[in-house]
Amino acid sequence: MLAALLWDVDGTLAETERDGHRVAFNQAFEALGLRWHWDHERYGRLLRVTGGRERLLAAMAEERDAPPTPAERQALARKLHDTKNHCYARLVYEGGIALRGGVAPLIHEARAQGVRQAIVTTTSRANVETLLARQLGPAWADMFDAVLCGEDVRAKKPDPEVYLLALRALRLQPRQALALEDSGPGASAAQAAGVP
Ligand code: XBP
Ligand code: MG
């Protein structure tokens, strides 16, 4: 019997990548005086790298005016990522990022049927809290038995670590749960943990 739904966030609960993170990255570039811009096509390619800071570092390899040393790149990536997350929070608060159709009804129905639920994402915790508080209300955390985020793991998706942590937190075997994912790296992470 299905015991738990394991929810990815970005791209699954909402179109946060195209309409949220991508827009916020571009706002951060502007705020820090950089002439970089990620259009849909470029961002689509960059999504193969999970983690916002990791994605920035990967993109710097393609930018001619990126800082020359690894230490300077790390420092810039940290600053850009902080700024990006602030911009993202503003977009979410302004109501620019709705849950995808069917998501809220399924969360409520699963809860009513006694199916447990967890958030299993490699995005930053602050981004998850902002989005779910705005879209599900201040008691959003009561709907989930565990909330696992990017800060909780050493290796982000496609590594299975975040799924293995969720299974441990819920005390479940992989096949008792179902992963809801939108992307290749996310689906690979679930599969590598044995979660359908
Ligand atoms: C999401 C990510 C994240 C977001 C940006 O993966 O890879 O990096 O793009 O969020 P998933 P942060 O859908 O598997 O959770 O900037 O907080 O990393
Ligand atoms: Mg996703």
Image (cartoon, rainbow, N blue to C red):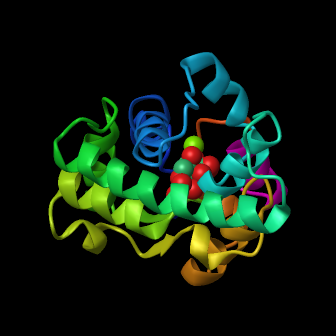
Task: Give the camera-side residue of 187 and 97.
Answer: 97
Compared with 61, 124 (above or below) is below
Magenta highlight range: 185-196
Q: Position of residue 193 (x, y in %)?
A: 79, 62
Quarter holding the N terminus is: bottom right
Q: At 29% from the left edge and 72% from the top edge, which residue is drawn? A: 141
Q: Position of residue 45 (x, y in %)?
A: 72, 27
Residue 167 shows in this picture: yes
- Corner quadrant of residue 115: bottom left
Left or right: 190 in relation to 17: right
Q: Is residue 189 magenta?
A: yes
- Corner quadrant of residue 187: top right
Image quarter where ligand 2 lies: top right
Q: Is residue 184 magenta?
A: no
Characterize the magenta stretch by its predominant secondary structure.
helix
Q: At 31% from the left edge and 29% from the top edge, which residue is drawn? A: 101
Q: Position of residue 191 (x, y in %)?
A: 79, 50
- Corner quadrant of residue 134: bottom left
Compared with 150, 88 (above or below) is above
Left or right: 135 in relation to 153: left
